[in-house]
Image: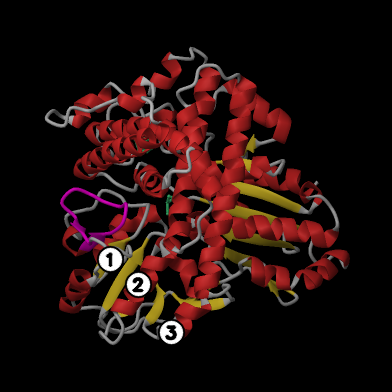
């Protein structure tokens, strides 16, 4: 197997025997075969689009299945076998529609005519289609590096777009670009510069996908407002929901109405408490339990109710809690309960609800502890005049955006130490699951402004970008001239997409850690550092001095 799409890739140079995430070589092979089939579907959708044939089914399917191949989403061969079947069916259906309109046979390339042998192991066939194919044809390691960057970036963009589409927000341009990018992976006539431009275009399209998602969230559930979230369990039956999917959380809140259950969020669903419509409508939407994804094996084992995982990051479950664990949507793990959805995409949670009702729940109230969420773009930019005044008066010296993914590597303690060392006259904005290393720290206030503000999930990176651009406009300077430094942590492919968006926007001086992506070659890194001054994190002390100088 060959996979190096995430930060925890084995020895920093690719998982070859078994995934450090728990992905088996078989699952990796069927994921590669699915990606190969999606690359064959892409040119067919491009042709269909040219002829005015609807590609909606193919587009939505492509988004969902790319999402399923991301790190810690789906570990189930059976599901990928099904996706591969569907992919070939959709492709052949579109070809049929094209031929009816064009009245002439089309000379499809081999990849668009590829037919797996469904009577044989798809994992075996996937081994012949692994991602090193795209290097064999180019023989240029830097182009291979950029092709992988594009593929991983569109996986991230597809996942944002998946959530936006669930909320009724779609843009044909996003779908069309994802298909074009997939088709381009097969091209050998593009230069290094062309590939850099495609990678930046991924960033541009991802910005649009994130904007759609922000619109989906805020038009459906209201703009997040500062909200205090209990971290202490309270007595009563309980159900836990993890991942990122706000729509599926809302569906669970609806289905648990008057059932005598308190709903707790886990991991990246913490910021959901900031949405006013959810808080107003569901009094049983109680609090948050646990921290970041890599702690789930310990935390899930102790939760006294059912647990639903809506998206990444799912870890291979322990026996101690697998009976009370449920997955939905693109998420899956062999042997774990899967709750299927109706034709509106809403899962039937009754089995998980029943499981929770049969479990003890929390037997006593614990001592109150709280954390604040809800500092998304609408809230932060509503006080921009106050912020400008505080900066002019020297009360605020600098802003730090310390955000991104968490993970298990020891080097990630950098981020906690960094926060602890940020001077008192500086403000920290944070987002995504990396914040769980410091989210409950009391950093105090500057005037009425909290020194630590949670912008939201990794899915709310758009909000952080909007805040940066909004402040730049308010200060009438370019975003690179703001007293703002970005200290980012990455783990999976959404972070790749967000980084490409930041580069597309021309944002410089980003510090990235805990290690740099294995798929970035020294030459590509040299280009990124010379053009954008993208740099690896060093030590908290050294980076703080550099940012504040
Ligand atoms: Fe965290 Fe995991 Fe949010 Fe990433 S929960 S690392 O895939 O999506 O961030
Ligand atoms: Fe390895 Fe990450 Fe790929 Fe899993 S997703 S196999 S940990 S590189």
Foreground: disc 1 or disc 3: 1
- In the image, taking residue 317 as reference, residue 437 lies left or right, namely right
In the rendered image, the quadrant that contains the N terminus is top left
Q: Which label's residue is closer to the chain start, 2 or 1?
A: 2
Task: Label 2: state its secondary structure.
Answer: helix
C-beta proximity under 8 Å, tags 2 and 1: yes
Residue at numbered disc 1: 347
Image: magenta residue range: 325-339
Task: Kindly identify which residue carries mark 2.
Answer: 251
Asked which secondary structure carries label 1, the reply is loop
**Distance Cα–Cα, label 1 vs label 3:** 20 Å
As measured in the structure, the alpha-carbon distance from the residue carrying label 2 to the one carrying label 1 is 8 Å
140 and 544: which is toward the camera: 140
What is the C-alpha distance between the residues marked 3 and 2? Answer: 12 Å
Q: Residues within 10 Å of mark 1 (few under 14, many from 20)?
A: some
Can residue 206 be seen here? Answer: yes
In the rendered image, residue 328, in percent from the top left (x then y), is placed at 28, 59
Answer with the quarter of the image where residue 77 lies. top left
The residue under label 3 is 281
Q: Residue 484 placed where, x, y %?
A: 74, 53
Residue 249, compared with residue 105, is above or below; it is below
Q: Which secondary structure class fits the magenta region best?
A: loop
Q: Residue at coordinates 35% horizontally, 44% vertically from top-left? A: 65
């Amino acid at each position: 197997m060959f996979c190096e799409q995430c930060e925890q890739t084995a020895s920093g140079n690719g998982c070859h025997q078994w995934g450090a995430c728990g992905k088996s070589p078989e699952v990796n092979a069927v994921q590669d075969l699915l990606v190969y089939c999606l690359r064959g579907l892409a040119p067919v959708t491009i042709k269909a689009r040219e002829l005015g044939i609807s590609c909606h089914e193919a587009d939505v399917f492509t988004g969902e299945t790319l999402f399923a191949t991301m790190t810690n989403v789906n570990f189930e061969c059976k599901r990928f076998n099904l996706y591969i079947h569907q992919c070939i069916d959709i492709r052949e259906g579109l070809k049929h529609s094209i031929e009816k309109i064009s009245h002439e046979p089309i000379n499809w390339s081999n990849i668009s005519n590829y037919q797996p042998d469904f009577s044989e192991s798809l994992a075996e066939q996937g081994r012949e289609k692994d991602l090193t194919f795209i290097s064999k044809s180019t023989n240029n390691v830097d182009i291979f590096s950029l092709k992988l960057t594009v593929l991983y970036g569109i996986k991230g963009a597809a996942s944002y777009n998946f959530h936006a589409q669930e909320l009724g927000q779609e843009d044909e341009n996003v779908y069309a670009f994802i298909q074009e990018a997939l088709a381009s992976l097969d091209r050998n006539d593009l230069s290094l510069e062309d590939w850099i431009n495609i990678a930046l275009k991924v960033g541009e399209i991802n910005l649009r996908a994130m904007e759609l998602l922000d619109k989906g969230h805020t038009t459906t559930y209201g703009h997040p407002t500062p909200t205090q979230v209990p971290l202490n369990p309270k007595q009563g039956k309980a159900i836990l929901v993890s991942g990122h999917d706000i729509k599926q959380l809302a569906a669970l809140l609806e289905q648990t109405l008057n059932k005598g259950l308190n709903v707790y969020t886990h991991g990246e669903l913490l910021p959901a408490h900031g949405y006013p419509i959810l808080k107003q409508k569901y009094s049983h939407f109680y609090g948050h339990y646990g921290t970041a994804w890599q702690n789930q094996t310990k935390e899930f084992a102790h939760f006294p109710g059912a647990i639903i995982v809506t998206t990444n990051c799912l870890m291979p479950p322990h026996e101690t809690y697998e009976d009370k664990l449920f997955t939905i949507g693109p998420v899956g793990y062999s042997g774990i309960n899967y709750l299927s959805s109706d034709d509106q995409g809403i899962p039937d949670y009754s089995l998980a609800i029943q499981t929770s009702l049969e479990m003890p729940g929390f037997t006593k109230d614990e001592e109150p502890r709280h954390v604040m969420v809800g500092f998304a773009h609408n809230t932060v930019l509503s006080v921009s005049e106050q912020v400008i005044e505080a900066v002019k008066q020297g009360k605020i010296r600098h802003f730090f955006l310390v955000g991104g993914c968490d993970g298990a590597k020891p080097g990630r303690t950098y981020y906690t130490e960094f926060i602890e060392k940020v001077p008192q006259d500086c403000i920290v904005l944070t987002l995504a699951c990396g914040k769980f290393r410091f989210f409950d720290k009391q950093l105090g206030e500057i005037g009425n402004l909290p020194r630590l503000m949670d912008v939201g999930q990794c899915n709310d990176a758009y909000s952080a970008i909007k805040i940066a651009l909004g402040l730049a406009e308010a200060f009438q300077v370019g975003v690179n001239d703001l007293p703002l430094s970005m200290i980012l942590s990455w783990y999976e492919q959404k972070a790749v997409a967000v980084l490409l968006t930041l580069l597309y926007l021309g944002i410089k001086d980003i510090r990235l850690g805990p290690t740099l992506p294995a798929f970035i070659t020294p030459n590509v890194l040299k280009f990124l550092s010379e053009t954008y001054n993208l740099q690896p994190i060093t030590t908290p002390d050294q980076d703080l001095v550099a940012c504040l100088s």
